[in-house]
Image (cartoon, rainbow, N blue to C red):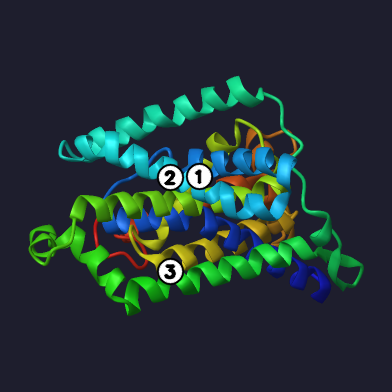
Amino acid sequence: MSLEILIFTIFNGVLYGMFLFMLSCGLTLIFGMMGVLNFAHASFFMLGAYFAYQISSFIGYWPALLIAPILVAILGGLIEKYALRGIHKYGHVAELLFTFGLFYIFEELVQMIWGKAPVAYEVPDILNFPLIEFSGISYPAYSIFRLLLSVLIFIMLYRILTKTKTGLIIKASLSHPNMVSALGHDVPKVFTYVFGFGCGLAGLAGVLAGNVIGTEPSMALLLGPIVFVVIVVGGLGSLKGALFSSLLIGMIQTIAISLEFSLNDIFNIMGYDIDIESKINSLTQITISQLAPIVPYLLLIIVLIARPRGLFGDRDV
Protein backbone atom coordinates (compact mmCIF):
# COMPACT_ATOMS: atom_id res chain seq x y z
CA MET A 1 0.00 0.00 0.00
CA SER A 2 1.49 3.32 -1.11
CA LEU A 3 1.76 6.35 1.16
CA GLU A 4 -0.90 8.21 -0.83
CA ILE A 5 -3.39 5.35 -0.48
CA LEU A 6 -2.59 5.01 3.22
CA ILE A 7 -3.23 8.72 3.85
CA PHE A 8 -6.41 8.55 1.77
CA THR A 9 -7.63 5.51 3.72
CA ILE A 10 -6.86 7.02 7.13
CA PHE A 11 -8.57 10.30 6.29
CA ASN A 12 -11.64 8.50 4.97
CA GLY A 13 -11.67 6.41 8.15
CA VAL A 14 -11.66 9.55 10.28
CA LEU A 15 -14.44 11.12 8.21
CA TYR A 16 -16.58 7.99 8.45
CA GLY A 17 -15.78 7.59 12.15
CA MET A 18 -16.82 11.14 12.99
CA PHE A 19 -20.03 10.61 11.02
CA LEU A 20 -20.73 7.56 13.20
CA PHE A 21 -20.03 9.65 16.29
CA MET A 22 -22.48 12.35 15.20
CA LEU A 23 -25.05 9.64 14.59
CA SER A 24 -24.53 7.87 17.92
CA CYS A 25 -23.65 10.63 20.40
CA GLY A 26 -27.31 11.52 20.93
CA LEU A 27 -28.19 7.94 21.83
CA THR A 28 -25.13 7.77 24.10
CA LEU A 29 -26.39 10.87 25.89
CA ILE A 30 -29.93 9.50 26.20
CA PHE A 31 -28.85 6.15 27.59
CA GLY A 32 -26.12 7.58 29.80
CA MET A 33 -28.43 10.14 31.39
CA MET A 34 -31.79 8.31 31.27
CA GLY A 35 -31.03 4.62 30.85
CA VAL A 36 -33.29 4.46 27.76
CA LEU A 37 -32.24 2.43 24.71
CA ASN A 38 -34.01 4.29 21.92
CA PHE A 39 -34.49 1.86 19.03
CA ALA A 40 -35.98 4.71 16.96
CA HIS A 41 -32.86 6.87 17.27
CA ALA A 42 -31.94 6.41 13.59
CA SER A 43 -35.48 7.51 12.69
CA PHE A 44 -34.76 10.94 14.17
CA PHE A 45 -31.62 10.98 12.02
CA MET A 46 -33.83 10.28 8.99
CA LEU A 47 -36.33 12.97 10.01
CA GLY A 48 -33.52 15.51 10.32
CA ALA A 49 -32.50 14.81 6.72
CA TYR A 50 -36.07 15.05 5.41
CA PHE A 51 -36.87 18.19 7.40
CA ALA A 52 -33.66 19.80 6.11
CA TYR A 53 -34.56 18.83 2.53
CA GLN A 54 -38.01 20.38 2.85
CA ILE A 55 -36.82 23.55 4.57
CA SER A 56 -33.84 24.04 2.25
CA SER A 57 -36.12 23.81 -0.78
CA PHE A 58 -37.89 26.95 0.48
CA ILE A 59 -35.34 29.08 2.34
CA GLY A 60 -31.96 27.45 1.73
CA TYR A 61 -29.53 25.09 3.46
CA TRP A 62 -28.20 27.29 6.25
CA PRO A 63 -31.57 28.03 7.87
CA ALA A 64 -32.36 24.31 7.50
CA LEU A 65 -29.14 23.46 9.36
CA LEU A 66 -30.49 25.36 12.36
CA ILE A 67 -34.23 24.76 12.13
CA ALA A 68 -34.38 21.03 11.26
CA PRO A 69 -32.51 19.77 14.39
CA ILE A 70 -34.66 22.04 16.57
CA LEU A 71 -37.84 20.57 15.08
CA VAL A 72 -36.54 17.05 15.65
CA ALA A 73 -35.58 17.95 19.24
CA ILE A 74 -39.07 19.34 19.90
CA LEU A 75 -40.65 16.20 18.46
CA GLY A 76 -38.40 14.01 20.63
CA GLY A 77 -39.23 16.03 23.73
CA LEU A 78 -42.97 15.73 23.09
CA ILE A 79 -42.67 11.97 22.60
CA GLU A 80 -40.78 11.62 25.88
CA LYS A 81 -43.22 13.81 27.82
CA TYR A 82 -46.50 12.40 26.55
CA ALA A 83 -45.62 8.77 25.77
CA LEU A 84 -42.24 7.48 26.89
CA ARG A 85 -42.45 8.98 30.38
CA GLY A 86 -45.43 6.80 31.26
CA ILE A 87 -43.75 3.70 29.83
CA HIS A 88 -40.43 4.31 31.60
CA LYS A 89 -41.68 2.84 34.90
CA TYR A 90 -42.32 -0.54 33.23
CA GLY A 91 -38.63 -1.07 32.45
CA HIS A 92 -36.28 -1.36 29.48
CA VAL A 93 -38.26 -3.99 27.59
CA ALA A 94 -41.35 -1.79 27.41
CA GLU A 95 -39.23 1.19 26.32
CA LEU A 96 -37.51 -0.86 23.64
CA LEU A 97 -40.80 -2.19 22.28
CA PHE A 98 -42.30 1.31 22.24
CA THR A 99 -39.37 2.80 20.33
CA PHE A 100 -39.35 -0.25 18.03
CA GLY A 101 -42.93 0.54 17.04
CA LEU A 102 -42.05 4.22 16.72
CA PHE A 103 -39.30 3.31 14.27
CA TYR A 104 -41.72 1.70 11.83
CA ILE A 105 -44.36 4.41 12.27
CA PHE A 106 -41.83 7.08 11.27
CA GLU A 107 -40.69 5.04 8.27
CA GLU A 108 -44.25 4.62 7.00
CA LEU A 109 -45.07 8.30 7.58
CA VAL A 110 -41.99 9.38 5.63
CA GLN A 111 -43.01 7.18 2.72
CA MET A 112 -46.55 8.59 2.78
CA ILE A 113 -45.34 12.21 2.77
CA TRP A 114 -42.20 12.13 0.61
CA GLY A 115 -42.59 8.86 -1.27
CA LYS A 116 -40.35 5.81 -1.47
CA ALA A 117 -37.80 7.26 -3.90
CA PRO A 118 -34.77 9.30 -2.72
CA VAL A 119 -35.30 13.04 -2.61
CA ALA A 120 -33.01 15.64 -4.18
CA TYR A 121 -31.38 16.95 -1.01
CA GLU A 122 -28.09 18.45 -2.19
CA VAL A 123 -24.87 19.84 -0.73
CA PRO A 124 -24.90 23.67 -0.54
CA ASP A 125 -23.13 25.25 -3.50
CA ILE A 126 -20.89 27.36 -1.28
CA LEU A 127 -19.23 24.20 0.10
CA ASN A 128 -19.45 22.06 -3.02
CA PHE A 129 -15.86 22.39 -4.20
CA PRO A 130 -12.59 20.51 -3.58
CA LEU A 131 -10.85 22.08 -0.58
CA ILE A 132 -7.93 19.67 -0.20
CA GLU A 133 -6.13 17.91 -3.05
CA PHE A 134 -3.42 15.32 -2.54
CA SER A 135 -1.90 13.10 -5.26
CA GLY A 136 -4.93 13.49 -7.47
CA ILE A 137 -7.38 12.83 -4.62
CA SER A 138 -9.64 15.69 -3.58
CA TYR A 139 -11.80 16.26 -0.52
CA PRO A 140 -14.84 18.54 -0.77
CA ALA A 141 -15.11 21.50 1.56
CA TYR A 142 -18.39 20.07 2.82
CA SER A 143 -16.64 16.96 4.16
CA ILE A 144 -14.18 19.12 6.09
CA PHE A 145 -17.07 21.23 7.39
CA ARG A 146 -18.84 18.08 8.68
CA LEU A 147 -15.61 16.88 10.30
CA LEU A 148 -14.95 20.16 12.10
CA LEU A 149 -18.54 20.44 13.28
CA SER A 150 -18.40 16.88 14.65
CA VAL A 151 -15.27 17.70 16.65
CA LEU A 152 -16.94 20.87 17.93
CA ILE A 153 -20.02 18.89 19.04
CA PHE A 154 -17.84 16.44 20.99
CA ILE A 155 -15.95 19.23 22.77
CA MET A 156 -19.20 21.03 23.61
CA LEU A 157 -20.91 17.89 24.96
CA TYR A 158 -17.88 16.82 26.97
CA ARG A 159 -17.51 20.22 28.61
CA ILE A 160 -21.23 20.47 29.40
CA LEU A 161 -21.39 17.02 30.98
CA THR A 162 -18.13 17.19 32.95
CA LYS A 163 -17.44 20.85 33.66
CA THR A 164 -20.80 22.48 34.30
CA LYS A 165 -23.49 22.41 36.96
CA THR A 166 -26.03 21.44 34.30
CA GLY A 167 -24.05 18.31 33.50
CA LEU A 168 -23.89 17.30 37.16
CA ILE A 169 -27.66 17.76 37.55
CA ILE A 170 -28.34 15.70 34.43
CA LYS A 171 -26.13 12.80 35.56
CA ALA A 172 -27.44 12.90 39.12
CA SER A 173 -31.05 12.79 37.86
CA LEU A 174 -30.55 9.15 36.84
CA SER A 175 -28.52 7.90 39.79
CA HIS A 176 -30.09 10.02 42.59
CA PRO A 177 -33.46 11.35 41.36
CA ASN A 178 -34.89 11.89 44.85
CA MET A 179 -31.94 14.00 45.93
CA VAL A 180 -32.11 16.08 42.75
CA SER A 181 -35.84 16.62 43.32
CA ALA A 182 -35.17 17.64 46.92
CA LEU A 183 -32.78 20.30 45.61
CA GLY A 184 -35.65 21.82 43.66
CA HIS A 185 -35.03 20.42 40.19
CA ASP A 186 -37.81 18.90 38.11
CA VAL A 187 -36.36 15.47 37.20
CA PRO A 188 -39.04 14.54 34.61
CA LYS A 189 -38.45 17.88 32.87
CA VAL A 190 -34.69 17.22 32.88
CA PHE A 191 -35.32 13.86 31.20
CA THR A 192 -37.54 15.53 28.58
CA TYR A 193 -34.82 18.04 27.76
CA VAL A 194 -32.16 15.32 27.57
CA PHE A 195 -34.24 13.08 25.32
CA GLY A 196 -35.17 15.98 23.07
CA PHE A 197 -31.56 17.18 22.89
CA GLY A 198 -30.34 13.67 22.05
CA CYS A 199 -32.92 13.37 19.28
CA GLY A 200 -31.90 16.82 18.05
CA LEU A 201 -28.29 15.64 17.75
CA ALA A 202 -29.49 12.73 15.62
CA GLY A 203 -31.46 15.22 13.53
CA LEU A 204 -28.34 17.36 13.11
CA ALA A 205 -26.43 14.30 11.90
CA GLY A 206 -29.21 13.74 9.36
CA VAL A 207 -28.97 17.34 8.14
CA LEU A 208 -25.20 16.99 7.67
CA ALA A 209 -25.18 13.52 6.10
CA GLY A 210 -28.47 13.23 4.24
CA ASN A 211 -27.17 15.18 1.25
CA VAL A 212 -24.10 12.93 1.04
CA ILE A 213 -25.35 9.39 1.62
CA GLY A 214 -28.79 9.99 0.11
CA THR A 215 -32.08 10.85 1.79
CA GLU A 216 -34.53 7.96 1.46
CA PRO A 217 -36.94 6.05 3.74
CA SER A 218 -34.57 3.10 4.17
CA MET A 219 -31.72 5.19 5.60
CA ALA A 220 -32.86 4.65 9.20
CA LEU A 221 -33.04 0.88 8.72
CA LEU A 222 -29.61 0.77 7.08
CA LEU A 223 -27.86 2.88 9.73
CA GLY A 224 -29.81 1.89 12.84
CA PRO A 225 -27.81 -1.27 13.66
CA ILE A 226 -24.41 0.43 13.44
CA VAL A 227 -25.53 3.01 16.03
CA PHE A 228 -25.99 0.27 18.63
CA VAL A 229 -22.64 -1.28 17.66
CA VAL A 230 -20.91 2.03 18.34
CA ILE A 231 -22.44 2.64 21.77
CA VAL A 232 -22.04 -0.98 22.93
CA VAL A 233 -18.41 -1.23 21.82
CA GLY A 234 -17.55 2.16 23.31
CA GLY A 235 -19.53 1.52 26.49
CA LEU A 236 -23.18 2.32 27.13
CA GLY A 237 -23.46 5.93 28.25
CA SER A 238 -19.80 6.82 27.66
CA LEU A 239 -19.25 9.84 25.41
CA LYS A 240 -15.50 9.20 25.19
CA GLY A 241 -16.26 5.58 24.40
CA ALA A 242 -18.63 6.59 21.60
CA LEU A 243 -15.92 8.78 20.06
CA PHE A 244 -13.24 6.09 20.37
CA SER A 245 -15.42 3.27 19.03
CA SER A 246 -16.67 5.45 16.16
CA LEU A 247 -13.13 6.21 15.04
CA LEU A 248 -12.05 2.59 15.62
CA ILE A 249 -14.92 1.18 13.56
CA GLY A 250 -14.46 3.85 10.89
CA MET A 251 -10.75 3.07 10.54
CA ILE A 252 -11.11 -0.72 10.61
CA GLN A 253 -13.95 -0.79 8.09
CA THR A 254 -12.28 1.69 5.74
CA ILE A 255 -8.99 -0.22 5.82
CA ALA A 256 -10.82 -3.50 5.27
CA ILE A 257 -12.53 -2.09 2.18
CA SER A 258 -9.14 -1.24 0.67
CA LEU A 259 -7.68 -4.76 1.16
CA GLU A 260 -8.26 -6.98 -1.88
CA PHE A 261 -6.37 -10.11 -0.83
CA SER A 262 -7.97 -13.35 0.33
CA LEU A 263 -6.99 -16.39 2.38
CA ASN A 264 -5.89 -18.03 -0.87
CA ASP A 265 -3.32 -15.27 -1.32
CA ILE A 266 -2.02 -15.83 2.19
CA PHE A 267 -1.81 -19.59 1.65
CA ASN A 268 0.04 -19.06 -1.63
CA ILE A 269 2.57 -16.81 0.09
CA MET A 270 3.10 -19.57 2.67
CA GLY A 271 3.63 -22.10 -0.10
CA TYR A 272 0.29 -23.92 0.09
CA ASP A 273 -1.91 -24.48 -2.94
CA ILE A 274 -5.61 -25.17 -2.37
CA ASP A 275 -7.39 -27.41 -4.89
CA ILE A 276 -9.44 -25.11 -7.09
CA GLU A 277 -12.26 -27.68 -7.20
CA SER A 278 -12.56 -28.07 -3.46
CA LYS A 279 -15.53 -26.62 -1.62
CA ILE A 280 -13.31 -24.78 0.80
CA ASN A 281 -11.76 -22.86 -2.08
CA SER A 282 -14.91 -20.78 -2.58
CA LEU A 283 -14.60 -19.58 1.00
CA THR A 284 -10.89 -18.86 0.88
CA GLN A 285 -11.39 -16.76 -2.25
CA ILE A 286 -13.51 -14.25 -0.34
CA THR A 287 -11.52 -11.03 -0.05
CA ILE A 288 -11.21 -8.91 3.07
CA SER A 289 -13.00 -6.05 1.28
CA GLN A 290 -16.03 -8.33 0.84
CA LEU A 291 -16.05 -8.96 4.59
CA ALA A 292 -15.84 -5.24 5.45
CA PRO A 293 -19.60 -4.82 6.13
CA ILE A 294 -19.56 -7.46 8.88
CA VAL A 295 -16.36 -6.24 10.57
CA PRO A 296 -18.18 -3.91 13.04
CA TYR A 297 -20.47 -6.74 14.12
CA LEU A 298 -17.54 -9.11 14.61
CA LEU A 299 -15.97 -6.43 16.81
CA LEU A 300 -19.27 -6.14 18.71
CA ILE A 301 -19.30 -9.88 19.44
CA ILE A 302 -15.66 -9.86 20.58
CA VAL A 303 -16.23 -6.90 22.92
CA LEU A 304 -19.39 -8.43 24.40
CA ILE A 305 -17.52 -11.67 25.13
CA ALA A 306 -14.39 -10.03 26.52
CA ARG A 307 -15.88 -6.95 28.20
CA PRO A 308 -19.69 -6.71 28.36
CA ARG A 309 -19.49 -3.16 29.71
CA GLY A 310 -17.76 -1.97 26.55
CA LEU A 311 -14.33 -0.40 26.27
CA PHE A 312 -15.14 2.66 28.39
CA GLY A 313 -18.49 1.78 29.95
CA ASP A 314 -19.32 1.47 33.63
CA ARG A 315 -22.51 -0.60 33.32
CA ASP A 316 -23.30 -4.01 31.87
CA VAL A 317 -25.21 -4.38 28.61
Count of numbered circles in the view = 3
Q: Residue furthest bottom?
A: 163
Mark 2–mark 3 distance (CA, rounded to whole Å): 19 Å
Q: What residue do we see at 53% from left, 44% from top?
A: 45
Q: What residue do we see at 62% from left, 38% from top?
A: 50
Task: Confirm or deny contact between disc 2 and disc 1 (CB under 8 A).
Answer: yes
Helix, strand or loop under label 2: helix
Instruction: Decide if residue 290 is on the left or right side of residue 233.
Output: right
Percent position of residue 134, x then y: 86, 73
Residue assigned mark 3: 157
Percent position of residue 317, x then y: 28, 51
Residue assigned mark 1: 71
Q: Which one is in front, 6 or 21?
A: 21
Residue assigned mark 2: 74
Percent position of residue 58, x then y: 72, 40
- The disc labelled 1 sits on which kind of residue? Leu
- The disc labelled 3 sits on which kind of residue? Leu
Mark 1–mark 3 distance (CA, rounded to whole Å): 20 Å
Mark 2, residues whose alpha carbon is within 10 Å: few (<14), some, or many (≥20)?
some
- The disc labelled 2 sits on which kind of residue? Ile
Q: What residue do we see at 43% from left, 45% from top?
A: 74
